[in-house]
Image (cartoon, helix red, strand yellow):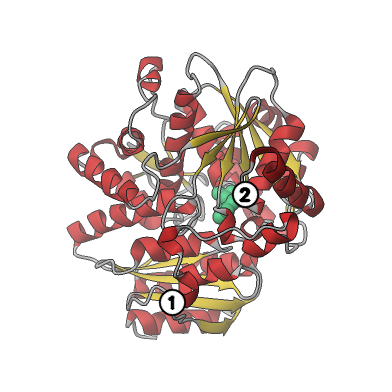
Amino acid sequence: MKYISTRGASPAIGFLDAVLAGLAPDGGLYVPEAWPQFTRAEMAGFAGRPYAEVAAEVLAKFAGDSIPRAVIDDMTAKAYASFSHKAVAPLTQLYDGVWQMELFHGPSLAFKDVAMQLLARLYDHALAAQGRTMTIIAATSGDTGGAAVEAFAGASHARMVVLFPEGRISEVQRRFMTTAAQDNVRAIAVQGTFDDCQTIVKAMFQDQDFRKAVDLSGVNSINWARIAAQSAYYFTAAAALGAPERPVSFAVPTGNFGDAFAGFVAKQMGLPIERIIVATNGNDILARMLSQGRYALGNVMATISPAMDIQIASNFERLYFECVGRDGSDTAEAFSGFAQTGGFDIPAGALATMRQTFTGLGVSEADTAATIASTHADTGQLIDPHTAVGIYAARTLGTDHGTTPIVVLATAHAAKFPEAVEEACGLAPALPLQAADLAARPEQFERLPADPAVLKAFIRDFAGAAA
Ligand SMILES: *Cc1c(COP(=O)(O)O)cnc(C)c1O
């Protein structure tokens, strides 16, 4: 299986090279050159199988012959053994026709663990074989950093640097990044927004000297292995609810469009997904794009679902590429233009294709808080604000046919956002056992300005690279 860039101007490369590269040299994102397929019998057979086994089946499709099957099986078994729930991604019913898939039983209590636990093992496998140590950088709106630090702390072939926007993430989120106490990890509070952090990381990748000097790699949601790992839970949830005989819909709290795009990937592989609801908070670039046909930057506003306080949905480039018939020069023009002008119109044909699968909804702060309270009143469950955005969207838009079950991706544990949950419903969620001592762990982090030169100098120094 080869991987090509959405901007059409980079050579096709293998799976592990695409994983280690993150961004393609032409600035595009890697996608498989063709979508692997599952038969209906294979998909039906996922029902009731251990999560790690289904994840291995999905990963094997994307890895092709680049990793021996026994190694893949071992990686997924170890990755998901770190979860505190034996089912890894259990489904619970909330309302008639509405389920939540609990993706928050990993070490940092957010769905990012599902991909990151696997990604760290893929890196170790690939880099050990090459005798190489890379510097991994992640800009984080909160949860990627914690998941990356939990997954890579103590890794023998990787150094980890996380950049987070100072003061814009919850204390619990911050503590998952700042308490790792491992020599190969640095957490940096950047004086700026998440989009500033993400823009700086992109610039670092475009600086070829710097990239080489520190052997830079990225594990942001643009990393192909993360998308591949996330597509696995669409299969387990759908199979549990009767797919492929019965189609299933999903409501996905979205920021960078990674998780929602993973659903599209599962659909491309044959899973009968009827609809994917793109549920955003007030940072609604994707919801506006779907309703108005224009992808246009707005101002980033701080919300109670901060992991989605994003106005540049990086993975949207992958969907655009698919929907313009995989035209790399069209995609390059649209997205390099976007970097300059902050907006472009989606061609009518592409928009129609997107709307066949996706519907968007921007959810207000008041509706998010009210959903935390109503879900608790109706079901006894405490949900986090990101999940609340998804539940509100699922209940507001429903599905095309009343009989299609809809699965809301529960992307974080309520205890990761205790202030917002308590404010909304008067109850403070307790941290689960595996994280109960978080507030007592000593913190260590740097505070630096949103200045690429300062950050690059810091990272060169950490990597032991000459300036
Ligand atoms: C990252 C994150 C999201 C958004 O996921 P994307 O893949 O960036 O769309 C939603 N909820 C939580 C809790 C997150 O950490």
- Does residue 206 lie above or below 32 as drawn? below
Separation (CA) of disc 1 from disc 2: 25 Å
The quadrant the C terminus occupies is bottom left
| Residue drawn at 43 percent across, 77 percent down | 441
Disc 2 beta carbon < 8 A from ligand 1?
no
Give the labeled residue for mark 1. Answer: 441
Q: Secondary structure at mark 2?
A: loop
Q: Nearer the viewer, mark 1 or mark 2?
A: 2
Residue 367 at x, y percent in the picture = 79, 47
In the shown orientation, is residue 190 left or right of residue 209?
A: right
Question: Residue 251, can we see it?
Answer: yes
Looking at the rendering, which quadrant does residue 128 occupy?
A: bottom left
Q: Are marks 1 and 2 in contact (CB under 8 Å)?
A: no
Amino acid type, callout 2? Leu
Q: Nearer the viewer, residue 418 or 342?
A: 418
Mark with earlier residue (1, 2): 2
Q: Secondary structure at mark 1?
A: loop
Who's the residue at 48% across and 31% down the image?
Answer: 237
Q: Closest to the observer: 452 or 334?
A: 452
| Badge number at residue 382 | 2
- Above or below 304: residue 356: above
* Neighbourhood count class around disc 2 (C-alpha, 10 Å): few under 14, some 14–19, many 20 upward: many
Q: Amino acid at mark 1?
A: Arg
- Residue 226 in percent (x, y) is at 43, 48
Q: Position of residue 172 (x, y in %)?
A: 55, 67
In the image: residue 57, left or right of residue 70:
right
The quadrant of the image that shows the N terminus is top left
Q: Residue at x 41, y 16 (%)?
A: 40
- Seen in the picture, residue 30 relative to 172 is either above or below; the reply is above
Q: Is residue 279 visible?
A: no
